[in-house]
Image (cartoon, helix red, strand yellow):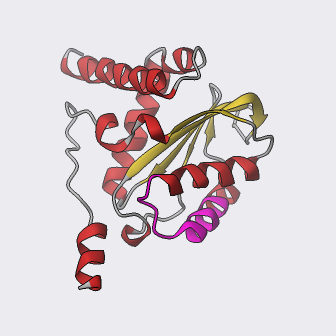
Amino acid sequence: EKLSDFHRRTTAKYHDLSDEAAIIPALMKPEWIEAGMTCRSKSSVIRQMVDLADRTGLLCYRGELVESLVEREKLCSTALSGGLALLHPRNHEPYMFEDSFVVVGKTVAQIPFGSPDRSTTDIFFLICCQDDRIHLHVLARLCMMCHQTSLLLEMRGTDHPHELHRILADSERQIIQQTRNP
């Protein structure tokens, strides 16, 4: 009985990955957004983001996630220009999470995180996906949202998780609209 329950909870769930489908509402909740993180280093950001992921109730192997994130950052930083980082495990193991999800963190001060342009970082997304297909779709969607809308600027204007979630959903709607009307 326990084995079948585990299998039911951890089997990859269907997520609509079409260009016109919104993924933010399915993968992100206001409770999974932490504004005002006081981290001052890459390692403290990783730990605090994993703490946030753990609070979703969807993380099965906390230690493995930390280890995989550290390995991924050693390979090449997930920080991008514009002050954001798209943290994700080095490998996407279906057993690590009960379902795919994304948590978001904002630090009170910008910190060095290894951006290719050497800029500092204050907005962090931790992408926790059960397979490569979902992961790549989420990564592409977040990149488009961050670089083709005013998402980052608007996120820096508030520390309220519900408002941040609304801003993220609005940004995604803009991207979907751009896809429909190129």
Where residue 93 sits in the image (x, y, percent)? 42, 69
Left or right: 108, with 49 as reference point: right
Residue 39: quadrant of the picture: top right
Left or right: 71, with 163 as reference point: right
As for residue 66 lying within the magenta part, the answer is yes
Where residue 113 sits in the image (x, y, percent)? 73, 41
Where residue 22 sits in the image (x, y, percent)? 26, 33
Res. 182 in view: yes
Where residue 174 sits in the image (x, y, percent)? 32, 17
When the figure is inspected, residue 94 is found, relative to residue 100, above or below; the finding is below
**Magenta span main SS:** helix
Residue found 40% across the figure and 63% down from its top:
97
Residue found 44% across the figure and 45% down from its top:
102
Image: magenta residue range: 56-71
When the figure is inspected, residue 146 is found, relative to residue 24, above or below; the finding is above
Residue found 60% across the figure and 54% down from its top:
51
Quadrant holding the N terminus: bottom left
Quadrant holding the C terminus: top left
Residue 165: quadrant of the picture: top left
As for residue 69 lying within the magenta part, the answer is yes
Q: How many marks?
A: 0
Residue found 61% across the figure and 45% down from its top:
78
Left or right: 74, with 29 as reference point: right
